[in-house]
Image (cartoon, rainbow, N blue to C red):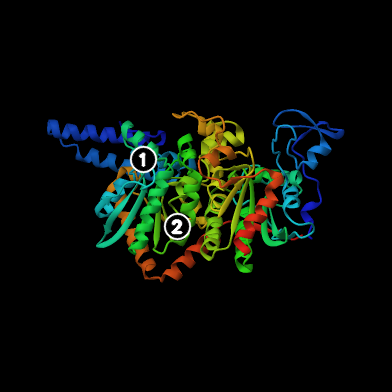
Amino acid sequence: MRTILDFEKPIAELDANIEALKRITAEQGIDKSEQIAALERDRERLLREIFRNLTPWDRTLLARHPQRPYALDYIRVIFDDFIELHGDRQFGDDGAIIGGMAWLNEKPVMVIGQQKGRDLKERQRRNFGMAKPEGYRKALRLMHLAQKFGRPVITFVDTPAADPGVESESRGISEAIARNLREMIMLKVPIVSIVIGEGGSGGALGIAVADRVLMLEYAIYSVIPPEGCAAILWRDPKRAPEAAEALKLTAHDAQRFGVVDEVIEEPLGGAHRDPLAAAQTVKEALLRHLPPLQKLSVGKLRESRYERYRNLGMWHIATE
Amino acid sequence: MQRGWFVRRSRTEGLAIDEMNDAWVKCNGCQQILFARDFERNLKVCPRCGHHHRLSARERIELLADPATFVERDAEVVSADPLGFPEYADKLSKGRANSGLPEAMVSGTCTLSGIPIVLAVADFAFMGGSMGSAVGEKVARAMEYALEQRLPIVICSCSGGARMQEGLLSLMQMAKTCAAAAKLHEIGIPYISVLTDPTMAGVLASYASVGDVVIAEPGALIGFAGQRVAQQAQVVKPPPNFQTAEFQLEHGMVDIVVPRKELKHTLQRILRFFTGG
């Protein structure tokens, strides 16, 4: 079933009218092309207007949109000959993190991503994109494999959070994330991360320490979900829209803070309206960012990555 | 010895029964009424049930540093309000008043049983010891100083996690502190992480977990997700000791659980292994 967000409803109504006119044309042979064209113009104008005025909360809902393309949707379009590799060699295989070998325009790369599920069964298998320790450890294993053979790493970030459950705690979810942060800083091959949907806190960061961090226009990146923030601030999760505003979780905020290097524009109305075009734009961005990184020496690469993270943050020097 | 942060006496955690009379405190563990002097003398560990009450940064430094050897560094690094976040400025002033500190982390150098070290200690009374840009910066600077001076570093964590009020910038302190830890790791500077009650979320999932040796205090709350989140919709029922120091020891995430009265001696023995011989 298609999900239609509240602010998408006027578009959905126009879409239905356009469909109906097309059906009349097809079934009854009556030419409605002029009316259709007029409606399509309205639709585009309306889309532009709605998407120009999105609130941070609207963007949060878009980032979580059930029709939004997920990591594997991007991987299928962007890369050739993807071979998925499984398991952390310690405990198991985590469905919430996928990874493997692939080719980006004739160049071999290691691809890693957080994967959500499309239907109920797959959502359970993917744990709603919430990775467990074995997921982060699989990701690290693949990064080390990439390092061993000098292949750059590309990660797709899309998770509400790391898995908060008892099992994950028992197997050291904090240690798994912390280790990834430390190891990714020192990795000897280039890393490019793309936040494609939800950049959920430490769970996202666990695969997102990179030389270049790119972010889709309607993705979000936050230290805490707006609902959780509202619950803490006002003891009322329903005030999430206000919290989304306060948290400054949009792509442009992330760029302003220096966390994100480039905001990738999405197709009009969001990536879910044209997943193929969205993937093409991401591919172009990758092809722009990766080659300069591959020209750097290992020393220079790691030094700039260190500096990139070392300089993040805003604080004061007290005068007395 | 710098004492800028020493001005105000921080709040004692054991509850005073009579606010006018500091002679008695109630244990947060067994609820027994204790003679305050015994309680203090026992390093705020209940002599009856062994419950370890929280120490302020100042008290922790007094516990670990040799007398009059602690020299504070980077005290001027304090929080800004980069997001203009609701009520943050107010919470910062309250944090300063509650803790008597300019920031949730105190760092500097000292000797521990004669061994020169870098020591950084979090204070829960300052916004739950949470990590914002300033705390992250102080941790990174402490680690870089340890690297520069080739000194071992001991960090005592006591924190609810990343500081929500600085949003994404707080999250990035996880990467920043781990970046500094990566350098220590690569060069081989000993880093000992001491987890005290509580060490949670963004702090546990970053620098606190990557020590060469990870020590925890008995009974300390140590975990990734808040208890409420962790227990919601759980398939597996959490064990009674869930997210305690003992739970983390049992699951291989902590090297040793050390009672407070043995902490300094244990640290000395570990530091000696790395630096002596």
Q: Position of residue A176 (x, y in %)?
A: 47, 48
Q: Which residue is mark 1?
A: A116
Mark 2 and mark 1: Cα distance apart in space: 23 Å
Q: What quarter of the picture does the C terminus of chain A occupy?
A: bottom right
Q: Chain of mark 1?
A: A
* Badge 2 density bin: few <14, some 14–19, many ≥20, Cα 10 Å: many
Q: Position of residue A280 (x, y in %)?
A: 29, 54
Quick check: B269 left or right of A38?
A: right
Find residue B25 and report its image quarter: top right
Mark 2 vs 1: CB contact within 8 A: no
Q: Position of residue B109 (x, y in %)?
A: 70, 61
Q: Position of residue A304 (x, y in %)?
A: 48, 66
Q: Chain of mark 2?
A: A
**Of discs 2 and 1, which sits in the foreground?**
2
Callout 1 amino acid = Lys
Find residue A283 and report its image quarter: bottom left
B66 and A289: which one is in front?
Answer: B66
Q: Which residue is mark 2?
A: A184
Image point (50%, 62%), residue name: A308
Image point (71%, 29%), residue name: B30
